Each structure stands twice: as structure tokens, then as C-alpha cells.
Amino acid sequence: MQVFKSRIRFAALFTVLIFAGCTTNPYLKSGEGYIQVEGGKVWYGIMGEGENTPLLVMHGGPGSTSRSFYQYSSIAEDRPIIMFDQLGSGRSDYHEDTSLLKVENFVAQIEALRKELGLKDFYVLGHSWGTALGLEYYLAHPEGIKGLVFSSPYFSTAIWDADADTLISTLPDSIQFAIQIGEENGDFMSAEYLKADEVFAKNFGLRKTRLSSELDTVPSESNSFIYNYMWGPTEFTATGTLKNYDRLTELKEVKVPTLFMTGEFDEARPTSVRYFQSLVPNSKFMMIEGAGHATMHDNNDQTVESIRSFLNSLNDNP
């Protein structure tokens, strides 16, 4: 569920945050900052300006970073995009404190950010693990959320595992055998297993070349400890604290317009995502052609246009 130059340059592009006397949201200007949460500081950045309803985006992992969301910069021509690195990864404080690695703590980080920015009306977009987090946040704090975008969604480990098994069955026999042996022996570091992981990722993760952005100027690293503790050694092997995670029933509680989006060759298989979509009234489905899990890199044009069109169709901006 993972997706991936000086601070002076970055600061020139991300300037300041201004609060003006608006009746709904404060006026957000491009900027960056930190908020204090339990366990450390969380970095956030605001990309774009304007009075259209902001979009709050949540990255995958767990333990990945927000850097791939720079590929949504053209959406920021319409509205501010609020990015943040979940505590422990990226530009936020690093940690390996397992007591902090609970879903409710991640939700609390988002609520702290919302309060810091004074958000009253906003959209939420999550990618991969970020969709589970987006749903968790909506369930805990639905007020002010005008719509949701679930990109390459993860809501059930059992379904994710089943989809992974289906995808693995399409790979060469030698790759399937290497995965089988690695999982039977618990040896996730053998050359054969690591090679199989690469093949899986090339087919269903990032299928093309990772795009770069002139806004991506500050080193931002993933946290493999968090990924392994909460998820596991690979995308197709869940051994961590999310092993029994399932929020399918709660999807039926979503009452705002929702877009479900996934890649044609995504780990979040289109058939499963269509099923998720069927559980949410007033929701839409979009398949990104030719893309794996990294839709914003594999087919940026269609990904961006799908998100922009959906948000603009809601027509609730000031």
C-alpha cells in the first residue's frame, strides 16, 4: 500500500498560511508548518490557494509519505490541497513507538490538523491505507466533510489478501512458488522472495515510471518499521496489527457524495472496488486505464481529471 531538492526552494514555493475573516473556512495560502500531537510533531503543507472548498489528502502505507500528492498540483489551481505526513514518516517526527501505532491515534492527528487550520468545510481524499484512515476519520468526525474520494481503497484485509492471491495466480509459476515457499518458511528476505515482490510490484503497483515534481524539494522517507508492524513484509502478506482489519459494514454509514477510484491493474482490484461502491449510496466508480496501484504516476491525466470533475460536480463552493 505504499506509493514514492533544498528547503530554501521549497519555502519559496510554500509560503505562509493566512487566516482571514471568512464565514466558513479561513483563507488558506500555500505554506507549510508543524502541529504537536501525542508522540511528536506532524508536518503539513498547503498546495494552491483560492476560496474553493479545500481537499485534505491522506497517504498510504502505513508508514509512507505524502510526496506522491504533488502529482495533484493541477487540482490545486481550483482549490487548496492540504497534505500531511502521518507521525513517524516523511517530514513528521520519526518514531518506533508501537503504543502510538493505533488507528485512533492516526485519526487524532487529522483532527488536530483540522483544528489548527480552522477547517469547517472540506473534502477528504485517501489513497490505499489512506482510504481506511479517511473512512475512520469520517466515522469519528463527519461534520464538515462534504465529500470523499477513495483512491485504490483498502477497507478489509481479507478482501485485500484474496485479491492478492488472485493477482499472484496470474504470475509465472516460478514467482508463485517463491512466494509460497517464503510464506511457508517465514523467510521474507530470501533473494527469491524479494524478486517475487519486485515482480508483483511491477505488475500491480507502479507499472510505469515514477513521475517527479518541482515541488518535491525536501527529502521525505518512508518508515519501514511502521509498515512492517502494522501491515507486513510485502503488499500481499499481512502479518501485522491490521491483519484482521475490516470496515465493510461501516461503508454503509457514509452519507456524503463519494468517488471510488482504482487502477485497471491495481492491487485494489476493480471488481472489489465496484463492490465497495455498491455499499455507498450516491457514490460513483472510476477505473484508471493502464494503471496499477500508483494511479497518480501510471495515468496522471485521467486520475487528476477524475478527481477534479467529481469535486467540481458537487458544486458547493462559495
Image (cartoon, grey):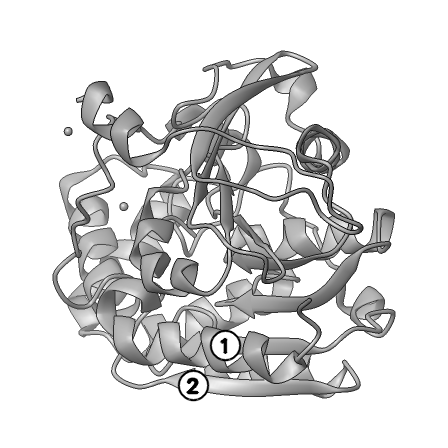
Q: Is residue 66 visible?
A: yes
- The crowd level at tag 1 (other Cα within 10 Å; few <14, some 14-19, many 20+) is many
Can you tell which mark lies on residue 158? Answer: none
Can you tell which mark lies on residue 261? Answer: 1
Helix, strand or loop status at disc 2: strand
Can you tell which mark lies on residue 287? Answer: 2
In this rendering, position of residue 21 left or right of residue 296: right
Q: Position of residue 121 (x, y in %)?
A: 74, 55
Q: Compute the Cα span from label 1 to label 2.
A: 6 Å
- The crowd level at tag 2 (other Cα within 10 Å; few <14, some 14-19, many 20+) is many
Q: Position of residue 171 (x, y in %)?
A: 23, 74
**Residue at figure coordinates x 32%, y 50% from the top left:** 70
Q: Is residue 256 above or below residue 28?
A: below
Kindly check if marks 1 and 2 are in contact, taking CB atoms under 8 A apart as contact: yes
Most foreground residue, 142 or 76: 76
In this rendering, position of residue 179 left or right of residue 211: right
Most foreground residue, 156 or 55: 55
Q: Is residue 196 above or below residue 305?
A: above
**Which quarter of the rendering shows the C terminus?**
bottom right
Helix, strand or loop status at disc 1: strand
Residue type, mark 1 in image:
Met
| Quadrant of residue 11 within the rendered picture | top left
